[in-house]
Structure formats: structure tokens, C-alpha cells
């Protein structure tokens, strides 16, 4: 995750991978994570970050942890500082359980990793498109984090039926109605995106616990009836969005959600 990493992103990864058994809510997971991190800091395995919402790790500890995790070829990591920005060959990644690649110059047409549960990617080129069929053979994926990529057309993402956490940061997005097919999704982060509306299909994500729409400055419309369907929603973040909330009792295809919908969410 790099230096001075955000605690909330680690929380998303932990929840998506289901690392804490017997913990059901976002708050319970956060508290358990803080306890674990406190113990690791006491053992000098973790360091404080620039703020209390961030954490750090000494390079030596990071390298040792990566070496241990990479045994058996289950983890593959490619960082910006790496000499090569080419995607690894199929043989290198086919047995991988987790992949983190940043600074890619190109992507394969299809990611052939049937065991993959975690994928984190970022591009040097903010207009790099993910190929149409990229996710066809990654149906076990639980966590997907994408930064600075073009997702204007990505039909194969609807095949990720096991996905629990989807994080999109600084990405170019088209119609996100397909996200409604991700029925097991618990966390949806769309941060600093160009989306203008949240379509009604998002209301199909009835397992969603955390919705983050921060810094989506073009977001002006949330279809009415969406939010009240997200009965398990515990946390909603919308800082710097320009949503014009509708009036209660006035609903049409062109209208907006009203704040009263949030009152129906007992977990929020």
C-alpha cells in the first residue's frame, strides 16, 4: 500500500477479503483493525503515519513481509519504481491469489487468474482502457481496486459475482448500471470520478454496507428510491458532491432522492 497509507483503505481490503471471522459490521471491523494495528506498532512492526488516519511501515519490514507473502507464487507485486512496466506473462500470474501492479503501460486482453481474490492496479496513463473481456477468468475476485484508469466500457465486470469490495479512484467511468449485477458487493468506493448520476440499478446492491462518493464533483442526481433499498448501509460519504436533494413526496424519473430516504436506513 506504500508509505503513509490510509487506514480506511486497509479497512476496505480487510472487509473485502473477510480476514476477521465473526465480525459483521463496519464499526466492529474498524475496532478490531485498530486493536491489531496497535499491537503491531507496540512490536515496532508498524509506524505512525502523518495523521491518526494513516500508518506506515519500515522498508525492511515491508520487504520481509512481501518476501514471505510471495512464497509459493501466490502474490505478485509490481511497483512504479520497478524497471519494467510490462504485464507479467500468464505463467507467472496464473496461480496468483493476489496481484498489485502500478505503473502499467499495457494490459493483456484477458487476465487468466482463476484463483485471484485481490487485484490492485494503477496506470501511468489516465486514459488507459481496461480490455472488454479482462475479467472473464477472474470470477473468484473479492477485492478490486483501480486507480487512474478508463472504465468507460467494461461489460466483463458484471461477471464478478463474488466481488465484495470495489474501489475506483480517479477513474474515467461510463454507465455504471452494470455495478448492479454485483449482488455480493459490501463496499463501493467511487472517489474523484466524473459520474453525473447514480442509476437505479445501484439499489440492487442490498448487501452494501459502505458507499463512498467523495469528490465526485459532477454528481448531481441520485435516482429516487435507491438509498432506501440499501437496507444494510452503515456508512455513506458524499463530500464535495453537488447532489440537489429532492422534496419528500415528489418522485418522478427526472427527480432526485430525498433525504427522508436515509431515515429508513436503520443501520446508518
Image (cartoon, helix red, strand yellow):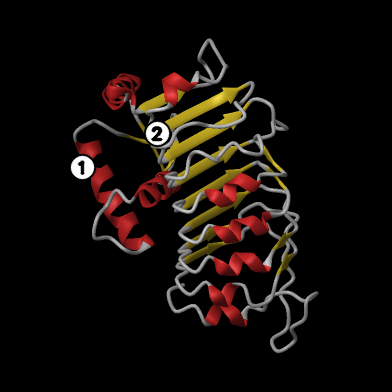
**To which quarter of the image does residue 22 belong?**
bottom left
Q: Nearer the viewer, mark 1 or mark 2?
A: 2
**To which quarter of the image does residue 209 belong?**
bottom left
Q: Position of residue 128 (x, y in %)?
A: 69, 30
Farthest-out residue, bottom? 249
Q: Position of residue 122 (x, y in %)?
A: 58, 31
**Residue linked to disc 2:** 98
Can residue 50 be seen in the rendering of this structure? no
Q: CA distance from mark 1 to mark 2?
A: 25 Å
Q: Position of residue 156 (x, y in %)?
A: 60, 45
Q: Residue at x 30, y 50 (%)?
A: 33
Farthest-out residue, top? 83
Eyeballing the image, is 7 above or below 84? below
**Residue linked to disc 1:** 39
Residue 107 falls left or right of residue 90: right
- Contact between labelled residues 2 and 1, with CB atoms less than 8 Å apart: no
Q: Residue at x 52, y 71 (%)?
A: 230
Q: Residue at x 40, y 50 (%)?
A: 16
Residue 58 falls left or right of residue 232: left
Circle on res. 249: none
Q: Position of residue 250 (x, y in %)?
A: 75, 86
Residue 70 falls left or right of residue 241: left
Amino acid at each position: 500500500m506504500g508509505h503513509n497509507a490510509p487506514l480506511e483503505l486497509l479497512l476496505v481490503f480487510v472487509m473485502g477479503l473477510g480476514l476477521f471471522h465473526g465480525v459483521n459490521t463496519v464499526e466492529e471491523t474498524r475496532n478490531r483493525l485498530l486493536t491489531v494495528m496497535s499491537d503491531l506498532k507496540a512490536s515496532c512492526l508498524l509506524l505512525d503515519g502523518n495523521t491518526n488516519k494513516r500508518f506506515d511501515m519500515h522498508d525492511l519490514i515491508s520487504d520481509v513481509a512481501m518476501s514471505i507473502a510471495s512464497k509459493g507464487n501466490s502474490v505478485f507485486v509490481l511497483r512504479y519504481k520497478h524497471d519494467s512496466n510490462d504485464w507479467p506473462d500468464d505463467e507467472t500470474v496464473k496461480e496468483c491469489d493476489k496481484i498489485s501492479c502500478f505503473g502499467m503501460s499495457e494490459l493483456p486482453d484477458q487476465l487468466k487468474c482463476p484463483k485471484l481474490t485481490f487485484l490492485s492496479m494503477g496506470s501511468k496513463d489516465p486514459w488507459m482502457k481496461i480490455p472488454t473481456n479482462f475479467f472473464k477468468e477472474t470470477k473468484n475476485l473479492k477485492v478490486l481496486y483501480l486507480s487512474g484508469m478508463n472504465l468507460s466500457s467494461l461489460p466483463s465486470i458484471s461477471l464478478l459475482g463474488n466481488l465484495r469490495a470495489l474501489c475506483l479512484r480517479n477513474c474515467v467511468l461510463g454507465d455504471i448500471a452494470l455495478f448492479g449485477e454485483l449482488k455480493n458487493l459490501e463496499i463501493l468506493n467511487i472517489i474523484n470520478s466524473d459520474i453525473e448520476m447514480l442509476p437505479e440499478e445501484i439499489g440492487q446492491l442490498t448487501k452494501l454496507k459502505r458507499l463512498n462518493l467523495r469528490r465526485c464533483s459532477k454528481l448531481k442526481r441520485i435516482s429516487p428510491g435507491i438509498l432506501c433499498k440499501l437496507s444494510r448501509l452503515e456508512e455513506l460519504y458524499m463530500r464535495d458532491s453537488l447532489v440537489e436533494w429532492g422534496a419528500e413526496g415528489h418522485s418522478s424519473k427526472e427527480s432526485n432522492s430525498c433525504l427522508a430516504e436515509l431515515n429508513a436506513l436503520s443501520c446508518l
